[in-house]
Image (tube, coloured by chain):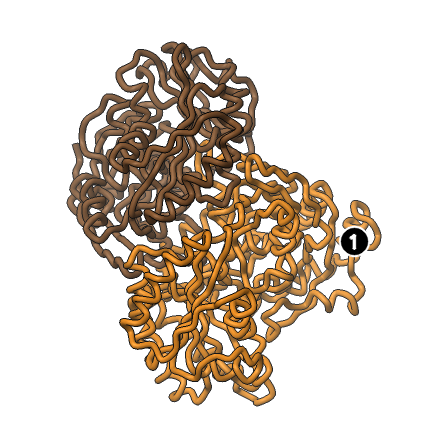
Chain colours: A orange, B brown
C-alpha cells in the first residue's frame, strides 16, 4: 500500500517539534523513543507498519488543543488514534506524523438517566460506556465486535455499527453531540443533550470522517433502557439462496429482529472445530434474535419460526434458557478467532442489497476457486453488511497481494450490485484506492471540499479515505 | 418558474444560472428568510425509482409527492420511520408536500425520539450543486461508511448546498396497532417527569407529548405501537409505572390514537391561531424551565425536548429565553418578521464559519436559496 513520502523538512526539525510538545504536555505523555513509538506503528491492519515521528497521549481537551496548535504551526501531519483496532488502517502513521492517542481520556463526565444520555471522554471503550450505565439497566446500542477494546473516538471516526443496528442504528444515530478540537487548536461544541442541529448538520458529517476533520475529545451519547429479555433462534438451511430468501421473508412479515446473522459452511466448520457450539453442519446458518417481554418474544418468534418452516430448514433451534442462548451466539462471536486459528485472514466489509445475497455469495464462491484462496462468510444479513474472510498465508510470498486482489474484486462486486465498499469498518488506507469504483471524481471532490473547510492545510490523517492521486495537490500545497 | 424535467436538465440550468434561484418542492413549508430569485421547482422530478420491501429500502425522485410514497409503502405494510410532519395546516399553505422537501427540512415527527429524524433514515442522495455538478453520496444500503456522510449534511440544509434530485431511505414495517396512555391536569414539570419515566422504561414508547393548554386542562400522552398483544401488555405495565403521577387512561382505539398523534405531529392546535410559532429543541428536563419564560401557549413533544410555542406576533422569543443549550427556530411569522428575526438559531462563530465555508464550496456563485438560513440579519 503506497503511502506519501515523508516530508524531509519535518523530519529535519523532529527535535524541535518534540521539544515544543514536551513544553505543553507531561513528560510521559510524549513518546519519541524509537522502541516505544513502535507500539504505534500499526493498528489492527497489521500488514502495514510505519513508526510515527512521535506519539502523544494528552489528558484533556486543553492539552489536545495545545498539541494541534503546535502541529498546525509546524505543518506536521497528525494521525488521531482511538484504541488502534481499525481493520482499515485508519490509524496507520507516516514517518513524518504525530500520533495523537486518546487513551488517557477515559472519564465519564455526566450520566443523565432522566434525559437518557451519557457524556464521556472519547478514549473510553465502547463496552465500558454500557458498563457505566448498566447499574440502572441502560445500555449504549452500537456494539462493534471489538467493543471490549475499541474507543468511542474510533467509533465516531468510523461511524461504527455492530450486530444490532437493524433495530438501533449505527454510531451516527446514537451520537448527540461532540467536543471537537480543530486542527488549529480551536475547540468547538457541536450538538449536546438536545436533538438535531440549529443549522447545517455538522455533527452528521463529522461522524464517519475518519479523524480527518477534527479530534473529538468528548461525546454525548444516547443511552437506552435494556429490553426485558432477548432470545435467539438458530436455523440451518441447505443452500445460501434459501437462507437469503428466509431473511427477506422475515423482514417483509413486519417483525423487526434486533439481529439477523448469517454464516456459510466454511465458517460453520471452522467455528465448530474451534468453539464447539454445537452448530449443525449445513450450507447456511441464521441466528435471529428478538427482544421484549416473554409474551412479546413468543409472539415474534412464532411468526419467525413459521416463516423458517416454510423454507425447509435442516435445523430449527430455539434457545430454551440463557445457557442455550449463549451457545447459539458462541460460534458467531468466536468466528473471527476461529478463522485466525486456522489461517491468516483478511476481513472485508462491503454492504449489498439484501436481495443480491444469493448472487453475491455464489460469485464469491466462484472467485474463491479462481484465486485458489478459501473464503468464509459471516455477516449481518438483515442490513446486507457482508464480512467475507479471505484465508491466506502471510508467510507465503505473493499470497497477501493475491488476497488483496481477491478482496478488491469482492468489493467491486458489492458496488456492482448496488452496494458499497464498507459498511462499518471505514475506508482507511485499505479501501482508499477503490473509492473511484463507487464514486466519480466529482462525487469525491464534494467530500474533499468538506475537508478543505475543516482542515485547510490538510494535516489531519491526510493519506486516508481518498486515493492519493486525488488528494495529491491538496496535500502538497500543505507541505 | 423553472421546472426541469430531469436531473440532467436541472444540472444544465444551474450550470448556466447567473442569478439566485428559490428552490421549491411542493411549496408547503415556507420556512426561513424569503430568498429572492426565480422559483426553481423540483415538482417535475417524480417517481419511485426502486422499492425493495424485503430489503426495507426505497429510492425516489426528489419531487415525488410524499402521499405517493406513503401509498406505495402502505401497500407493502411498511412506512417511513420518522413520521414527517405535514406543515400545511400550521402554516396555512396548500400544495403537495414532496419527499425532497421533507429531506431539505429534515422534517420529522413525534417518533423522532425513538426512530430518529429524516436524517437518520436517509441513506443516499443525488443532488446538483450551485455550479451544475451532479453529486451522489451514500447509496441504497442501510450500512455505508464509504467516505464522508454528505447525506446527513444535505438533510436539513434547506436547499442551500444543492438541489436534491434523488433520495433513498431505509424503512420500517408498519405496526399492527397502537395505543395511547393519557394523564390529565399535570403541571409541565410533573408531565415531563412522567414522560421521562415512560421513556426510561423498557416498553418502547414511540411518542411522548404534553399539551400545557394554559387556562384549560393539560393533557399528557404516551404512545405505544406494535403487535396487538405486545401493545396491550406494555400499556398495562406502563400504567403501573405511571400510577404515581395520577389516573392513567388507556385509549385503545387505533383510529382515534392515530388521529390524536396526527394532530400532535402537525401542531394543529396552533393552526389558524393568531401569533408567531416557534419550535425549540432542548434537553427534555430543561423544557419546563424554558417554557416558563414563554408568554403564550406551549405544546411539548419528544418527552419535553421539543417545545412548540405560540407567541405574540413580531416578538423575538430568543430575547425572552436568553442563553440555553439547544436552539429555537421561527417556524411561522409574517415575512416582515422573518426579514428581521433570523429563522435559524445563531451559532457560535467557529460553527457559523464552518457552515459559511461549506456553502461557499457547494454554491460558489451564491445562487441557492441565498440567505434563507442566514443568522446575521442585514442592518435595518
Q: Quadrant of residue A148?
A: bottom right
Query: Residue at coordinates 33% horizontally, 31% vertically from top-left?
Result: B265
Relative to A65, residue A55 above or below: below
Looking at this view, is A64 or A222 the one in front? A222
Q: How many marks?
A: 1
Relative to A309, residue A112 above or below: above
Q: Position of residue A212 (x, y in %)?
A: 55, 52
| Disc 1 element | helix
Q: Position of residue A339 (x, y in %)?
A: 54, 80
Task: From the viewer's perspective, tell me whether residue B280 is left or right of residue A438.
Answer: right
> Which quadrant of the rendered structure holds the N terminus of chain B?
top left
Task: State the residue position of label 1.
Answer: A29
Q: Quadrant of residue A310?
A: bottom left
Q: Position of residue B312 (x, y in %)?
A: 39, 10
Query: Residue at coordinates 77% horizontally, 50% vertically from top-left?
Result: A21
> Which quadrant of the rendered structure holds the C terminus of chain B?
top left
Task: From the viewer's perspective, tell me whether residue A104 is left or right of residue B44.
Answer: right
Task: From the viewer's perspective, tell me whether residue A374 is left or right of residue B228.
Answer: right
Q: Position of residue A233 (x, y in %)?
A: 43, 68
Relative to A77, residue B120 above or below: above
Crowding at mark 1 (Cα within 10 Å: few <14, some 14-19, many 20+): some
Query: Residue at coordinates 42% horizontally, 26% vertically from top-left?
Result: B183
* Circle 1 chain: A
Looking at this view, is A378 or B361 the one in front? A378
Looking at this view, is A254 or B347 the one in front? A254
The answer to whether residue A286 shows anywhere in this view is yes
The answer to whether residue A1 shows anywhere in this view is no
Amino acid at each position: 500500500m503506497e503511502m506519501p513520502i515523508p516530508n524531509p523538512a519535518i523530519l529535519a526539525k523532529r527535535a524541535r517539534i518534540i521539544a515544543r510538545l514536551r513544553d505543553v504536555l507531561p513528560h510521559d505523555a510524549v513518546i519519541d523513543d524509537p522502541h516505544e513509538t513502535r507500539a504505534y506503528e500499526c493498528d489492527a491492519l497489521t500488514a502495514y507498519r510505519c513508526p510515527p515521528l512521535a506519539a502523544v497521549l494528552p489528558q484533556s481537551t486543553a492539552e489536545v488543543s495545545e498539541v494541534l496548535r503546535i502541529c498546525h504551526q509546524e505543518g506536521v501531519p497528525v494521525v488521531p488514534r482511538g484504541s488502534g483496532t481499525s481493520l482499515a488502517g485508519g490509524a496507520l502513521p507516516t514517518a513524518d506524523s504525530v500520533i495523537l492517542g486518546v487513551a488517557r481520556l477515559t472519564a465519564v463526565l455526566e450520566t443523565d438517566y432522566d434525559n437518557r444520555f451519557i457524556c464521556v471522554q472519547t478514549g473510553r471503550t465502547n463496552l465500558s460506556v454500557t458498563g457505566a450505565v448498566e447499574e440502572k439497566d441502560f445500555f449504549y446500542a452500537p456494539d462493534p465486535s471489538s467493543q471490549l477494546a475499541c474507543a468511542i473516538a474510533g467509533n465516531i471516526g468510523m461511524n461504527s455499527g455492530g450486530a444490532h443496528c437493524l433495530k438501533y442504528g449505527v454510531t451516527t444515530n446514537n451520537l448527540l453531540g461532540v467536543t471537537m478540537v480543530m486542527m488549529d487548536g480551536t475547540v468547538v461544541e457541536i450538538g449536546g443533550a438536545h436533538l438535531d442541529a440549529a443549522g447545517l448538520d455538522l455533527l452528521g458529517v463529522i461522524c464517519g470522517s475518519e479523524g480527518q476533520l477534527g479530534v473529538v475529545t468528548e461525546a454525548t451519547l444516547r443511552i437506552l433502557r435494556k429490553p426485558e429479555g432477548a432470545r435467539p433462534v438458530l436455523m440451518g438451511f441447505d443452500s445460501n439462496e434459501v437462507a437469503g430468501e428466509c431473511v427477506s421473508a422475515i423482514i417483509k412479515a413486519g417483525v423487526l429482529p434486533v439481529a439477523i446473522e448469517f454464516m456459510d459452511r466454511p465458517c460453520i466448520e471452522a467455528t465448530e472445530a474451534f468453539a464447539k457450539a454445537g452448530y449443525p453442519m449445513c450450507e447456511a446458518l441464521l441466528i435471529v434474535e428478538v427482544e421484549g417481554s416473554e409474551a412479546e418474544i413468543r409472539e415474534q418468534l412464532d411468526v419467525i419460526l413459521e416463516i423458517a418452516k416454510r423454507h425447509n430448514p435442516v435445523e430449527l433451534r430455539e434457545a430454551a434458557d440463557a445457557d442455550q442462548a449463549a451457545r447459539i451466539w458462541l460460534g458467531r462471536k468466536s468466528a473471527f478467532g476461529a478463522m485466525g486459528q486456522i489461517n491468516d485472514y483478511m476481513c472485508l466489509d462491503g454492504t449489498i442489497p439484501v436481495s443480491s445475497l444469493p448472487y453475491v455469495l455464489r460469485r464469491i464462491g466462484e472467485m474463491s476457486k479462481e484465486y485458489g484462496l478459501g473464503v468464509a462468510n459471516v455477516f449481518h444479513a438483515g442490513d446486507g453488511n457482508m464480512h467475507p474472510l479471505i484465508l491466506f498465508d502471510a508467510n507465503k510470498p505473493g499470497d497477501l497481494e493475491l488476497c488483496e486482489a481477491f478482496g478488491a474484486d469482492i468489493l467491486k462486486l458489492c458496488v456492482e450490485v448496488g452496494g458499497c465498499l464498507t459498511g462499518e469498518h471505514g475506508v482507511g488506507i485499505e479501501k482508499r484506492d477503490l473509492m473511484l469504483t463507487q464514486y466519480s471524481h466529482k462525487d469525491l471532490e464534494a467530500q474533499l471540499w468538506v475537508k478543505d473547510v475543516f482542515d485547510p492545510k490538510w494535516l489531519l490523517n491526510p493519506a486516508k479515505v481518498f486515493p492519493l492521486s486525488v488528494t495529491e495537490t491538496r496535500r502538497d500545497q500543505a507541505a | 418558474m423553472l421546472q426541469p424535467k430531469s436531473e440532467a436538465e436541472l444540472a444544465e440550468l444551474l450550470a448556466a444560472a447567473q442569478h439566485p434561484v428559490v428552490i421549491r418542492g411542493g411549496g408547503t413549508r415556507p420556512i426561513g428568510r424569503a430568498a429572492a430569485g426565480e422559483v426553481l421547482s423540483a415538482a417535475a422530478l417524480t417517481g419511485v425509482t426502486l422499492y425493495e420491501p424485503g430489503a426495507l429500502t426505497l429510492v425516489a425522485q426528489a419531487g415525488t409527492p410524499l402521499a405517493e410514497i406513503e401509498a406505495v409503502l402502505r401497500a407493502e405494510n411498511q412506512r417511513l420511520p420518522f413520521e414527517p410532519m405535514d406543515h400545511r395546516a400550521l402554516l396555512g399553505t396548500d400544495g403537495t408536500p414532496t419527499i425532497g422537501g421533507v429531506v431539505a427540512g429534515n422534517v420529522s415527527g413525534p417518533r423522532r425520539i425513538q426512530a430518529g429524524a429524516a436524517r437518520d433514515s436517509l441513506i443516499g442522495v443525488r443532488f446538483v450543486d450551485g455550479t451544475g455538478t451532479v453529486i451522489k453520496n451514500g447509496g441504497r444500503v442501510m450500512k455505508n461508511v464509504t467516505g464522508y456522510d454528505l447525506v446527513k449534511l444535505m438533510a436539513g440544509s434547506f436547499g442551500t448546498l444543492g438541489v436534491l434530485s434523488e433520495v433513498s431511505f431505509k424503512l420500517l414495517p408498519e405496526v399492527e396497532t397502537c395505543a395511547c396512555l393519557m394523564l390529565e391536569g399535570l403541571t409541565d414539570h410533573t408531565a415531563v417527569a412522567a414522560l421521562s419515566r415512560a421513556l426510561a422504561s423498557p416498553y418502547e414508547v414511540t411518542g411522548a407529548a404534553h399539551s400545557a393548554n394554559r387556562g384549560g386542562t393539560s393533557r399528557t400522552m404516551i404512545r405505544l405501537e406494535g403487535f396487538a398483544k405486545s401493545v396491550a401488555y406494555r400499556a398495562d405495565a406502563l400504567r403501573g409505572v405511571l400510577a404515581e403521577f395520577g389516573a392513567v387512561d388507556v385509549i385503545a382505539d387505533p383510529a382515534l390514537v392515530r388521529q390524536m398523534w396526527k394532530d400532535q405531529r402537525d401542531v394543529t392546535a396552533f393552526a389558524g391561531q393568531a401569533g408567531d410559532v416557534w419550535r425549540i429543541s432542548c434537553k427534555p428536563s430543561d423544557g419546563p424551565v424554558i417554557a416558563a419564560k414563554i408568554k403564550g401557549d406551549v405544546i411539548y413533544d419528544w418527552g419535553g425536548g421539543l417545545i412548540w410555542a405560540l407567541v405574540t406576533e413580531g416578538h423575538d422569543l430568543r430575547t425572552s429565553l436568553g442563553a440555553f443549550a439547544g436552539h429555537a427556530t421561527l417556524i411561522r411569522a409574517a415575512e416582515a418578521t422573518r426579514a428581521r428575526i433570523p429563522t435559524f438559531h445563531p451559532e457560535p462563530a467557529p460553527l457559523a464559519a464552518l457552515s459559511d465555508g461549506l456553502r461557499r464550496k457547494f454554491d460558489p456563485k451564491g445562487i441557492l436559496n441565498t440567505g434563507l438560513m442566514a443568522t446575521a440579519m442585514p442592518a435595518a
